């Protein structure tokens, strides 16, 4: 009986010793340092400091009189980080995109890519395609007309492809009003405009015909606005769902609009009617189609 108690006591002492040693070892082990991302060293301050130290960059008007700087981290298809800075000009309507080169956690070069345009509709992304890695950007004029432009990351100052994608310009054309049957020939002063809802179409990069090449599908809503005789009131008259499919043509090395795969569907129509006992003309929604299911590329 005593031997059993002694053996049990000995085992408890050994177990307690092991636990104490483990606790001491754990508490004395240095804590792991948090992972520091390399791009955390790219900040607006470091961007401006590099510009101040380079007279050529500092003398550029769109940097010298900059208003805001937005820096983003992007990845190419190989997992490399691409640092880009959107610079909005002070007292101007436009913006520019700059490529930031990093080495050993420091900025070594800033390249003006020449990518930019109307800051209201400008946006960009880095996309991987069968044709290579590109900076895709919505570039437009101060009036709101422009394209989705693709710039190779290897040569960011040279545009490779361009596709119509931005339209928020109320051009107020009489021919547009006639085309959509909004006026008859005797209503000389009535005009109309074609714009995209939100100013631009949405882009998807898909191999739609399964030929091994990335194609581009642009989707969105096109709106037709009527302009009153005073050229001030904008009245919504038509809405169309738009899907423009651009297939990549290897022989021409370009994206070609496919009339067969593209669609344009009337989803809303606002037409005039006369209220009973009232000569004043008004507008009523005549027909509508639920179009949420049409955006199946997202």
Image (spheres, helix red, strand yellow):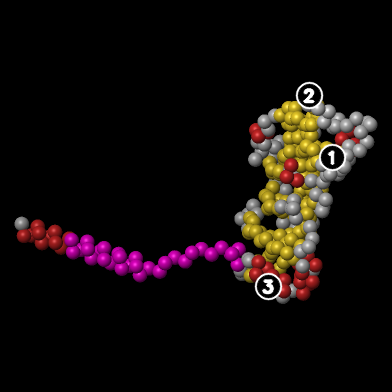
Q: Tell me the residue at 6%/60% (across/down).
A: 2
The crowding category of the residue bearing disc 1, from other C-alpha atoms within 10 Å (few below 14, some 14 to 19, many at least 20), is many
Marks 1/3: CA–CA distance: 50 Å
Residue pointed to by mark 1: 227
Measured along the vertical axis of the image, is residue 185 above or below residue 83? above
Q: Nearer the viewer, residue 174 or 88?
A: 174
Name the disc covering residue 294, or none. Answer: none
**Badges 1 and 3: C-beta atoms under 8 Å apart?**
no
Measured along the vertical axis of the image, is residue 121 above or below residue 63? above
Estimate the x, y position of residue 30 in percent, counting from the top left. Answer: 40, 69
Q: Magenta segment, principal secondary structure?
A: helix
In the rendered image, the quadrant that contains the N terminus is: bottom left
Q: Tell me the residue at 82%/46% (across/down).
A: 169
Q: Nearer the viewer, mark 1 or mark 3?
A: 1
Marks 2/3: CA–CA distance: 70 Å
Name the disc covering residue 49, or none. Answer: 3
Residue pointed to by mark 2: 276
Estimate the x, y position of residue 112 in percent, counting from the top left. Answer: 76, 63
The crowding category of the residue bearing disc 3, from other C-alpha atoms within 10 Å (few below 14, some 14 to 19, many at least 20), is few
Mark 2 and mark 3 lie on one chain; the one further toward the N terminus is 3
Q: Residue furthest front?
A: 277
Read off the magenta span: 12-41
Estimate the x, y position of residue 293 in percent, counting from the top left. Answer: 65, 33
Residue 250 in view here:
no
The crowding category of the residue bearing disc 2, from other C-alpha atoms within 10 Å (few below 14, some 14 to 19, many at least 20), is few
Mark 1 and mark 3 lie on one chain; the one further toward the N terminus is 3
Total marks in image? 3
Q: Nearer the viewer, mark 1 or mark 2?
A: 2
Marks 1/2: CA–CA distance: 25 Å
**Badges 2 and 3: C-beta atoms under 8 Å apart?**
no
Q: Tell me the residue at 81%/27% (across/down).
A: 278
């Amino acid at each position: 009986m005593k031997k059993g108690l002694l053996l049990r006591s000995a085992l408890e002492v050994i177990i307690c010793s092991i636990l104490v040693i483990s606790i001491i070892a754990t508490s004395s082990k240095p804590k792991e340092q948090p992972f520091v991302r390399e791009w955390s060293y790219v900040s607006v301050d470091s961007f401006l400091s590099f510009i101040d130290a380079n007279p050529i960059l500092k003398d550029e008007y769109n940097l010298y009189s900059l208003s805001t700087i937005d820096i983003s981290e992007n990845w190419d298809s190989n997992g490399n980080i691409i640092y880009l800075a959107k610079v909005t000009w002070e007292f101007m309507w436009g913006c520019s995109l700059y490529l930031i080169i990093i080495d050993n956690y420091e900025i070594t070069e800033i390249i003006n890519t020449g990518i930019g345009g109307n800051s209201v509709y400008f946006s960009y992304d880095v996309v991987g395609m069968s044709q290579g890695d590109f900076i895709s950007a919505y570039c437009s004029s101060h009036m709101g007309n422009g394209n989705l432009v693709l710039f190779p990351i290897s040569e960011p100052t040279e545009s490779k492809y361009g596709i119509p994608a931005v339209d928020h310009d109320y051009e107020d054309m009489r021919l547009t009003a006639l085309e959509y049957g909004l006026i008859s020939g005797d209503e000389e002063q009535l005009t109309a405009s074609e714009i995209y809802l939100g100013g631009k179409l949405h882009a998807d990069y898909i191999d739609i015909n399964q030929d091994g090449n990335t194609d581009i599908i642009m989707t969105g809503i096109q709106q037709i606005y009527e302009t009153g005789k005073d050229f001030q009131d904008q009245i919504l008259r038509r809405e169309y769902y738009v899907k423009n499919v651009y297939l990549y043509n290897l022989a021409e090395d370009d994206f070609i609009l496919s009339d067969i795969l593209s669609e344009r569907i009337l989803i809303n129509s606002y037409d005039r009617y006369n209220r009973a006992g009232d000569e004043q003309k008004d507008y009523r929604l005549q027909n509508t189609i639920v179009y949420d299911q049409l955006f199946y590329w997202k």
